[in-house]
Image: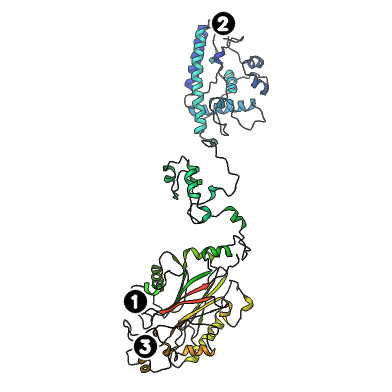
Amino acid sequence: MSTPNGFPQHSRVCLTRSMEGGAVQDLQAKKAGKAAKKEAGGDGAPPKIGTPISETLKLLPEELKANMKIRSITPRPPRKPRLERAASLDEKSWRKWRRFRTSQESLTDPNETSSSNGSLQEASPSPPTRGRASPCNPCCQQDSLHSSPEALEAGPGGKSRGGASDLGKRASEISSAFGGLLRGKGFAGGKPRLSQIMPARPLPPMELNVASHSLRTANRIDSDCLDYRHYSQHKFGRVSSSLSDSRLQGNGTLYDNCSTDSMKSTFSVLTPIRAKDVRSRSYLEGSLLASGALMGAEELSRYFPDRNMGIFVATWNMQGQKELPVNLDDFLLPTDPDFAQDMYVIGVQEGCPDRREWEIRLQETLGPHYVLLHSAAHGVLYMSVFIRRDLIWFCSEVEYATVTTRIVSQIKTKGALGISFTFFGTSFLFITSHFTSGDSKVNERKLDYNKTIQALTLPKNVPDTNPYRSSSSDVTTRFDEVFWFGDFNFRLNKDRETVDSILNQHPDTDVSKLLVYDQLTSEMSRGSIFKGFQEADIHFRPSYKFDIGKDSYDSTSKQRTPSYTDRVVFRSRYKDDIQAVKYSSCPVIRTSDHRPVFALFRVKVRPGRDK
């Protein structure tokens, strides 16, 4: 078929020169045009540059006619050649393509925001991109009419139509290759634009319920998540909590990288939290009984159904020995209670030179279930607080203060060290002290006590849980639960021979006759020291003074009287909040002239506010 102007219908194709072979393709197009002219017998005449634009528009689709602006084209003489450096074939192709793009934009609708057209859309089902695309079909037709008319010379004969068809196929291949090059690599010197990334398949619909199963985690602790294992196996095809990408892709799941990354949070090992619980929480203003309060009654009952926690408190005068015991299990983990305690507080007087090594040994003994909440030192006074790992989130900021009881404050062998914090809604104060030594220096020890309760500046930033029952002159009144332990140095007011005879006559558990001569028991009954404090019943032998490495008391020339110098006392704002479970010493540790003394307590804990 030929048009009235003699143009073959098959020759209206998009002839786009590639970047590398533009010149070669021009020669091939010219040869094909001349061959077609000879075979047609010269009936067809090539269009001239001055051909009216209305005649050319007859060859274009109706769609383009409506959107094109008709402009008259006036022939111009060729420009004078100007001197410039020699350009490569790539540069020439690039310049021609830039001129072609300019003419293309002049023909498109100014309201269009993209230069891509339906040519690529017809060839590929993918959505249009915002990057630079290959020339469009209609515009390419117009450009080819004006830029290379020799290629369109053809007659109405069959051979001419066949030659034009072959030429069109080659031009289409070149056009598609050139378009792919534009989409993939772009041009040197221009800013590349990548095509829009589209998902390989439609995204799954979002669930209307905010508290969807996909937001829940894989930890099977709460009773409301017992069905999560079955749900995960049904929906995701696996129950493993591993966060590895290879495990996600190798377990029969057909997820791409994006899906894999988004599913990592689904299989977390953290405690499950429902969205409605998060909405009901208030971290700025909590409530004692409100549902979802972090320190409230609901959370407290979850961890402590009877609202009682176990606390281990110990004191030991190490006598400054470098050698540490081989095993601390009998000291920290006695066999009498069936379970370990929730909190461990250890105070040391005349501690070993390497404090860090001491704390490492404590951590090794307690194991990974406990973490060091806080440790502090005042000279050779050490205190370490360990707590169960899953309870650390309910502790407030930990504060500490020190007091020196010696006249020369630089000598820190005697004094006190206090650590305080709030656990849920209950405030705790732990004090370890080393009072003045000497059999007859009872008054000096009472002065040490009075100076400690007045000079220990706690709490600092953590608010008092009950300020109406606090006193500025006594630090022990500003906390709910107070534990005071250390080497108080109170002795037995009896000679060595009498004490030895009592110890030899009575078994280890019956020491009531010795306590009659105990200085601390006498002073506490008078109310001159440790006002409001209590002490559990003593059923162990005196913890001082032993020969190092032996179970015998002082055999030196001084012949010191065995005494209960190492003690643990306690007080509470509320009656019966603290119950003593065990009070004993550890005779198997013989590296010091003191035996470690420890006590186990059951302490009532109250809910608090989220502050």
The residue labelled by disc 2 is: 43
Badge 3 marks a residue whose secondary structure is loop
Badge 1 marks a residue whose secondary structure is loop
Q: Nearer the viewer, residue 502 or 352?
A: 502
Is 152 located above or below residue 387 in the figure?
above
Badge 2 marks a residue whose secondary structure is loop
Structural distance between the alpha carbons of marks 1 and 2: 117 Å
Task: Report x, y in % for residue 288.
Answer: 61, 66
Q: Answer with the quarter of the image where residue 132 lies.
A: top right
What amino acid type is highlighted by mark number 3? His
Residue at point 60% right, 13% down? Answer: 47
Task: Report x, y in % for residue 198.
Answer: 54, 36
Is 54 located above or below residue 385 in the figure?
above
Q: Which of 263 and 24 is in front in this view?
A: 263
What amino acid type is highlighted by mark number 2? Asp
The residue labelled by disc 3 is: 506
Viewer can see residue 338: yes
Sequence-earlier tag: 3 or 1: 1
Callout in the foreground (1, 2): 1
Structural distance between the alpha carbons of marks 3 and 1: 33 Å
Residue at point 39% right, 75% down? Answer: 331
Contact check, label 1 and label 2, Cβ < 8 Å:
no
Viewer can see residue 92: no
Q: Which mark is residue 572?
A: none
The residue labelled by disc 1 is: 323
Q: Which of 277 and 539 is in front in this view?
A: 539
Sequence-earlier tag: 2 or 3: 2
